[in-house]
Image (cartoon, rainbow, N blue to C red):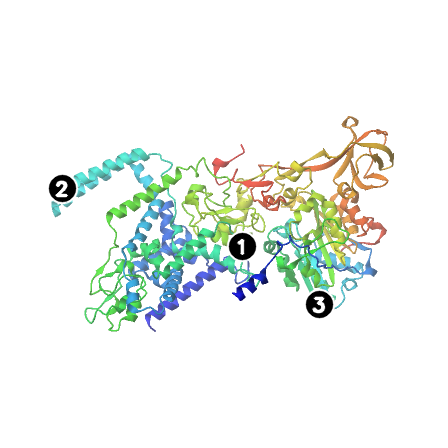
């Protein structure tokens, strides 16, 4: 009787359970950029075919001092690719496996101790990584592919942000790297105007991220506040001119023979917009990202290298 | 090696490969994923699958020919499948053995005795085959109408045969003639009533109780999802299947009934066992006693798995060849040999002609009764979206055995078992539920049709699905069509920009397109112009928070009579509203009313492009009841559901 009484008193709860407690834990996403490399951009224009992504990206990096200027020996590197859709690489809706493999090899050659490839796609994650060819190419090149699952996400708030408040972010891979390289193809996007390196960070969000489409330009601005990348690679070898961001037909693509490597993602997107026959002024998110100090839309004012890839 | 040891090894082997095949039926290229594993092999070895689809459709699909091997072996050897192979039987045997550990021999003999209820399985078999034979019977009944001469010839042939038999064997000729005449009249009358009947049809329901599909379904849908976790990841995505409670409940009921009587399911319910019982009743080899040496100790009945009573007159159709009686007999009387048991044997299942006929008639007529609901006709349920490549509904119901292979292999977990959405005969058949899973039905995936063991979902190619190459003229396979619910859609109903559906539409050109509309924003009062400085407007009126209206989606405009386009707001500050460009410089003056507008892209669906993949429905941010939803409207498999000219 005493035991039962003690148990009853032990478990006694005078109050009803509180509503969901606010996540008070504060995780921080570090600044991955390198101060002395800031404001550098290389626009590599290809030959007529312009399909040798591996060769072009190497030359573009070389023009900025080579990969060793970005990745120091022993550092761990995250490649945030675009693997959003379960579609083959030829349709250009996702990062091209050749390009991903080339960047991985360059990182490893620069002495990176580990290269991780990840994205939180829209279609089924395993199918996306398999069908885009990224999974096979990345593994072959020596990288680790992280397919997102619930346990890899953590709630995060962008300081000064309005939308990314206590929101699940693909944090686990971010937490164990020293450098982050954003890789995105140039694509039409009906809602935001274009999907390039800034919009690409959407793939780090989890949860019901689709509701942010109500305020697409602000969410891209906050993503630019959230991630300060080491460098971004914008692939305009072909650009998806229409029907983006999914594409689905070769006729949606246009050979634009351009590949941009930039430490300033805003500049990269501003330059990339021209490939879609748009201007930076047509894309409100560029001005919004610039206004919070994520970069400079006037890419010509930066340390600009324009090269002709051979 | 003792024969029961050999049996246990065989059972263990098939049980493990059954579980292995269930597990690897998941899309991927690793060795533990679907990579050439013959995951349907046990289903194909099950001759009830082959026989059922053969009766219902008149064809035997691809690998189902394996069932023939099982049938031939059963005719020669008896019910070896039940005792040596069937993984469901193995499970029952193990559970029954555990339940009876430590019981006295007399209690064991009592629990393993033959029971009259064991005939129920034959009744179920005949009922299920009757339901599957509706189409065949309909054709037979049609003969007097379509080819009356053939019908007449058959009747005459029977009459002549009776005459011959009458003179050689002296059977009563009058009874023969009366019999043939009554049957002939019955035939004609029945054909009169059923001629052209749309309701008399074949419905394959064997899968409800057929042990291999049942076990397969239970493992795929209710067991594997439970063990799938962070430690052991055996599915492409974590699995959820609404409506599987009944599947699990039946499975566990079958398992726990072994506590009452070992192999309860095998003895009383299993229609496949019944089929084997009939096929193997005159098997060449059978279990039985030698001529002498029996002391009537009854030990052979103690562990009898089939309840066939080998100690006395053995009931061969009930014997599952467990061979326990051979091991238990201390006098070496029991054997497996070419002659009948010395104590006698009953080779006929304990079921009367009357019961047989009643079960058959019930099966045949049950289908028209169900079809009265019209669910395969005008009352079709548009919520039932079948996987791409599915046959038209009636043909689909002639083939689907509800094994759950399509649901297991689906990489996005979008295929689910129906409850009653497809009618009572469609229970546990596959339907697509776009609210669930990791994505809609992925454009470039044809896994379900290529795994379906009965071709209820045809094995289509990517080209056929997308309407490319040789399939250009037919266009893509459509499984349904998306409809925008304008009462729930953010831009349509709530003036909030969104178009996630348009963004994710995988078709090119997109099936979801948008039309722009500028709608006035609901504010507390009028905005009036105070002055202009370049691209900046000074205004008075309600407060316009920058975070809300300087997002890139809001515009200002003058009254429409000015004919000027709206201008996008880029910033709102103390000094006024900054615009991307200012077209109003000339037209506007102090005190003019300014309209604040939101630019909306309103989604529309193009029925000529939409394939019903449901990616839009899956991605729609209105998560409860989606603001864009797919129904089976305009699906290509049913011409009657066509929407366009």
Please identify the quarter of the rendering in which residue A154 is found.
Answer: bottom right
Q: Position of residue B429 (x, y in %)?
A: 45, 47
Residue at mark 2 shares a chain with residue at mark 3: no
Q: Which mark is residue A113?
A: 3
Who comes first in sequence, dot 2 or dot 1? 2
Which residue: 44% across, 50% down?
B402
Count of labels in the image: 3
Q: Using a 10 Å C-alpha cutoff, classify the residue at mark 1 as few (fewer than 14 neighbours), some (14 to 19) or many (20 or more).
A: many
B308 or A261, nearer to the observer: B308
As helix, strand or loop, the secondary structure at mark 2 comes to helix
As helix, strand or loop, the secondary structure at mark 1 comes to loop
Residue at mark 2 shares a chain with residue at mark 1: yes
As helix, strand or loop, the secondary structure at mark 3 comes to loop
For the residues labelled 2 and 1, the Cα–Cα distance comes to 67 Å
Q: Position of residue B114 (x, y in %)?
A: 27, 59
Q: Using a 10 Å C-alpha cutoff, classify the residue at mark 3 as few (fewer than 14 neighbours), some (14 to 19) or many (20 or more).
A: some
Q: Nearer the viewer, mark 2 or mark 1?
A: 1
Tell me if residue B136 can be seen: no
Q: Using a 10 Å C-alpha cutoff, classify the residue at mark 2 as few (fewer than 14 neighbours), some (14 to 19) or many (20 or more).
A: some
Question: Chain under label 2?
Answer: B
Question: Chain under label 3?
Answer: A
Which residue: 45% across, 43% down?
B422
For the residues labelled 2 and 3, the Cα–Cα distance comes to 97 Å
Kindly identify which residue carries mark 1: B239
Question: Chain under label 1?
Answer: B
Task: Answer left or right for B251 relative to B409.
Answer: left
Q: Position of residue A227 (x, y in %)?
A: 74, 55
Q: Position of residue B72 (x, y in %)?
A: 32, 58
Kindly identify which residue carries mark 2: B173
């Amino acid at each position: 009787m005493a035991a039962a009484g003690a148990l009853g008193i032990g478990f006694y709860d005078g109050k009803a359970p509180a509503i969901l407690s606010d996540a008070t834990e504060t995780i921080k996403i570090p600044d991955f950029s390198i101060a002395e490399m800031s404001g550098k951009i290389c626009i590599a224009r290809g030959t007529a075919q312009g399909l040798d992504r591996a060769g072009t990206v190497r030359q573009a990096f070389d023009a900025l001092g080579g990969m060793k200027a970005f990745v120091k020996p022993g550092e761990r590197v995250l490649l945030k690719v675009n693997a959003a859709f379960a579609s083959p690489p030829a349709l250009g809706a996702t990062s091209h496996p050749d390009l991903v493999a080339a960047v991985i090899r360059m990182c490893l050659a620069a002495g990176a101790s580990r290269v991780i490839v990840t994205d939180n796609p829209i279609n089924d994650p395993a199918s996306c990584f398999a069908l885009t060819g990224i999974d096979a190419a990345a593994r072959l090149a020596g990288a680790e592919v992280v397919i997102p699952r619930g346990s890899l996400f953590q709630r995060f708030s962008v300081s000064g942000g309005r939308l990314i408040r206590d929101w699940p972010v693909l944090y686990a891979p971010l937490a164990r790297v020293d450098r982050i390289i954003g890789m995105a193809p140039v694509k039409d996007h009906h809602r935001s105007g274009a999907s390039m390196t800034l919009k690409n960070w959407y793939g780090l969000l989890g949860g019901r991220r689709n509701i942010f489409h109500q305020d697409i330009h602000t969410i891209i601005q906050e993503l630019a506040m959230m991630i300060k990348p080491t460098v971004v690679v914008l692939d305009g070898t072909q650009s998806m001119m229409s029907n983006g961001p999914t594409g689905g037909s070769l006729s949606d693509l246009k050979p634009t023979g351009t590949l941009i490597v930039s430490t300033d993602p805003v500049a990269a997107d501003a330059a990339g917009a021209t490939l879609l026959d748009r201007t930076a002024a047509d894309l409100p998110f560029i001005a919004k990202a610039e206004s919070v100090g994520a970069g400079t839309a006037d890419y010509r004012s930066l340390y600009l290298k324009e090269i002709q890839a051979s | 090696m003792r024969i029961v040891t050999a049996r246990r090894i065989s059972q263990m082997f098939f049980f493990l490969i059954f579980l292995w095949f269930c597990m690897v039926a998941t899309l991927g290229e690793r060795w533990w994923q679907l990579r050439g594993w013959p995951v349907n092999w046990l289903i194909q070895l099950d001759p009830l699958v082959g026989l059922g689809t053969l009766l219902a459709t008149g064809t035997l699909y691809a690998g189902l020919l394996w069932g023939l091997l099982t049938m031939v072996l059963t005719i020669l050897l008896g019910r070896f499948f039940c005792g040596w192979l069937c993984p469901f039987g193995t499970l029952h045997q193990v559970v029954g053995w555990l339940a009876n550990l430590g019981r006295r021999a007399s209690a064991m003999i009592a629990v393993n005795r033959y029971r009259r209820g064991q005939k129920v399985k034959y009744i179920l078999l005949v009922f299920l085959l009757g339901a599957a034979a509706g189409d065949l019977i309909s054709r037979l009944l049609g003969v007097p109408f379509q080819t009356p001469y053939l019908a007449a010839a058959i009747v005459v042939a029977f009459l002549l045969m009776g005459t011959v038999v009458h003179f050689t064997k002296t059977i009563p000729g009058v009874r023969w003639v009366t019999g043939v005449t009554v049957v002939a009249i019955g035939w004609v009358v029945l054909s009169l009533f059923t001629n052209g009947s749309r309701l008399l049809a074949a419905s394959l329901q064997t899968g409800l109780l057929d042990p291999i599909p049942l076990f397969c379904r239970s493992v795929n849908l209710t067991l594997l999802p439970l063990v799938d976790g962070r430690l052991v990841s055996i599915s492409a995505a974590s699995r959820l299947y609404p409506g599987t409670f009944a599947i699990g409940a039946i499975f566990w009921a079958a398992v726990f009934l072994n506590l009452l009587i070992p192999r309860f399911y095998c003895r009383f319910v299993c229609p496949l066992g019944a089929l084997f019982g009939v096929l193997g009743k005159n098997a060449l080899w059978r279990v039985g006693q030698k001529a002498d040496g029996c002391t009537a100790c009854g030990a052979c009945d103690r562990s009898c798995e089939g309840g066939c009573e080998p100690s006395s007159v053995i009931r061969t159709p009930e014997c599952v060849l467990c061979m326990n009686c051979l091991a238990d007999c201390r006098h070496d009387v029991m054997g497996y040999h070419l002659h009948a048991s010395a104590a006698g044997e009953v080779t006929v299942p304990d079921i009367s002609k009357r019961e047989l006929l009643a079960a058959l008639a019930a099966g045949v007529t049950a289908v028209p009764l169900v079809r009265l609901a019209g669910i395969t006709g005008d009352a079709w349920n548009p919520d039932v979206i079948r996987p791409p490549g599915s046959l038209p509904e009636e043909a689909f119901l002639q083939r689907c055995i509800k094994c759950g292979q399509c649901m297991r292999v689906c990489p996005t977990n979008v295929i689910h078992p129906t409850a009653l959405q497809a009618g009572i005969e469609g229970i546990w058949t596959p339907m697509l539920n776009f609210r669930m899973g990791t994505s809609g039905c992925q454009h470039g995936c044809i896994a379900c049709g290529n795994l379906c063991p009965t071709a209820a979902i045809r094995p289509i190619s990517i080209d056929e699905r997308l309407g490319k190459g040789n399939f250009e003229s037919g266009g893509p396979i459509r499984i349904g069509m998306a409809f925008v619910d304008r009462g729930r859609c953010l831009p349509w109903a709530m003036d909030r920009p969104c178009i996630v559906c348009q963004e994710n539409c995988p078709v090119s050109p997109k099936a979801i397109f948008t039309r722009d509309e500028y709608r006035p924003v609901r504010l507390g009062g009028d905005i009036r112009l105070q002055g202009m400085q370049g691209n900046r407007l000074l205004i008075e009126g309600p407060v316009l928070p920058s975070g809300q209206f300087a997002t890139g989606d809001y515009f200002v405009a003058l009254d429409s009579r000015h004919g000027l386009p709206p201008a996008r707001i880029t910033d709102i500050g103390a000094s006024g509203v900054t615009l991307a460009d200012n077209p109003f410089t000339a037209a506007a003056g102090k005190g003019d009313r300014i309209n604040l507008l939101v630019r909306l892209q309103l989604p529309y669906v193009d029925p000529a492009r939409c394939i019903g993949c449901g990616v839009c429905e899956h991605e729609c941010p209105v998560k409860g009841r989606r603001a864009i939803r797919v129904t089976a409207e305009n699906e290509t498999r049913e011409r009657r559901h066509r929407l366009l000219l």
